[in-house]
Structure formats: structure tokens, C-alpha cells
Image (spheres, rainbow, N blue to C red):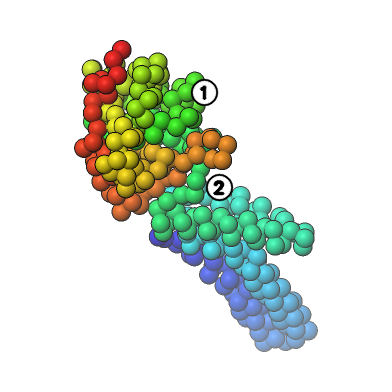
Amino acid sequence: MSNAGYSKRSPTIRSWPWLEAAIALVVGLVMFLINKKDLAQVTWTIGAFQSFGRLAYSRLLASELEPIRKMAEVVDLNATSDLDNIRNLSRLYTNITEPEFNEVKELVVQNAIARLQKLANEKTSDDLASGEYYAWLLPRIEQVGRGEEIWAVSMMLDSEWDDSPSEQRFLESNINAAKRGAVVNRIFVVSEQAIPGLRENKGIRAHLVRTRGGGLNGFIVHREFLQLRDPGLLRQLGEGLIAFGARVAVIDATSSEGLIRGRVTMNPTEIAALRRMFDALRSHANELANEVKL
């Protein structure tokens, strides 16, 4: 990962004090040779003080910006980062001059570095809060085009497929993706006692309608069957997932308040494991339309 945009500028900044010292030395020598000894001494003195001051300032600035430099080691400043955000971060950091905030601002930067390193090295995020989860997920679904696949496991949590605005937009995004020609394969893991009420669920009904026409394909697995025949797989399912081809997936979770959230992963090994889990679950699944009639 390159951070050449940062490293190429830094040596130039550090070289200025030595360049100014050399200029002062040459000018002073010229003054001395033309018998302007007093002026030569003044030139040398001013040049030395100016060079020393600039050198001290540059080293102080470099020390102050060391946390930002560490972030630049994680972030590609040339290709993938918004440089305005990096500059704004640097400005804000140096503008916080109160000594009482030194440890606090250092902690903020260190936390940001840790999260960026996790993204860079492990290709996975921390859990996104509910609002962040939908803010990330909905645009991803809207970007899926013809022939691309969305594959998902719904554990029928209380926070799924309800009448909340976020879940309504989520359902609409899935329907629109299928209309654009995307293939949406979703497996619902449902307890047997809940099956009679599924036909009243808008999310379930949408998968029944689209299954007949093409892109929004629903499948169903009984939770009791998994508990009896494949309990290890049931444990692996956690609280569900949604994935986009082999590129990226979000693994669902719920907060202590029951709000849906999730962790984004682009780790190829993890996504491959999730796909194997999905395919294993699909081998146990029936067509949704075979068990739920409109």
C-alpha cells in the first residue's frame, strides 16, 4: 500500500533549513571577500538563527503530526483516500493545543489507526450500528446489476421484515434489484410454528411473487430440522447474513436493544467459508412457494 504522496513531500520540507544555511554562508562569504566584514557577520548570524528556527519548527511539526503519519501508513493517500479529509484531520489535530486534551486526542487517533489497520489487514470492519448498517447496505443493493447475485440467510429475527422505514426500504431495494435482472437467493430459517403466519409477512410475500417470475428467490428451512439433523450448521448461521457475489458480505447481529446491525467483511477466506455454509443450508431447503401459499 503506497503512501508516496506523504513521503515525497516530507524530505523536501526537512531540507529547507539546510538550503537556507548554505545560501546564507555563500552570501556572507561574498560580503567578506568584498571587504564587507560587518555585513558578512550579520548575514551569517541571521542565516544561522533563521535556519535553526526553521529546523526546530519542522522537527516539532513532524513530532506533532506523527500520529497522522502513522495513519498515512495505513491509508493510500494517492489512490483511495479523500485527501481533503486527511488534511482536515491534520488541521484539527494541530489546532487542539490545550494540554488537557493531549491524551484524549492521541486516543482518538490511535483508535482510528486501529480500525483502519483492521480494514487494511483483516478486510473486516467493526460492528456497524443500526443506522450505519442500513446506510452501508441499501446503496450496495441498489448497485447490483443484471446477472449479479445477492445471497442471503434470514433467521427471521424480530427486527427483520417489519414495518419500520429501514426494513421497508430494504425490501424495496431487493425487489428493484430483481427487476433489474439481479438474482436474489434468500433462505429463511423459520420455526415450524411460525409457518402459518408467514403469508401475512410482506417480505415473505414478495419472495413468493418474484419466485414465479424470476429474480427474487425464496427458500425455507425449518429450525427444528436443523437442530436435529445439523446443529453445527445452525450454530454457524448466527443471526444471518447478506452477501454480494464473492466480493463482500455483511454478517448480521443484533444489539442488546434488539436493533439489527452487522459487520462488513471483504476477507476472501471468510466469504468462501460463508458461501460453503450457505450452500450446505441450501441443500436442506425447500422452495418457499411449496410451503407457503398465497
Q: Nearer the viewer, residue 140 or 162?
A: 162
Q: Residue at x 33, y 35 (%)?
A: 224
Label 1 vs 2, first from the N-terminus: 2
Relative to 293, 78 lies left or right: right
Contact (Cβ within 8 Å) of mark 1 with mark 2: no
For label 1, the SS is: loop
Disc sitting over residue 84 in the figure: 2
Q: Is residue 13 above or below residue 281?
A: below
Identify which amino acid the numbered label 2 is placed on: Asp
Relative to 100, 251 lies left or right: left
Q: Nearer the viewer, residue 43 or 201?
A: 201
Q: Nearer the viewer, residue 207 or 103?
A: 207
Q: Is residue 162 above or below residue 126?
A: above
Of badges 1 and 2, nearer the viewer stands 1
Relative to 189, 229 lies left or right: left
User: x%, y% of residue 166?
Assistant: 49, 26
| The residue positioned farthest toward the top in the image shown | 294
Disc 1 target residue: 164
Identify which amino acid the numbered label 1 is placed on: Ser
Task: Quarter of the image for the N terminus: give it.
Answer: bottom left
Where on the picture, by quarter, is residue 52?
bottom right
Q: Residue at x 33, y 40 (%)?
A: 227
Badge 2: residue crowd in 10 Å (few <14, some 14–19, many ≥20):
few
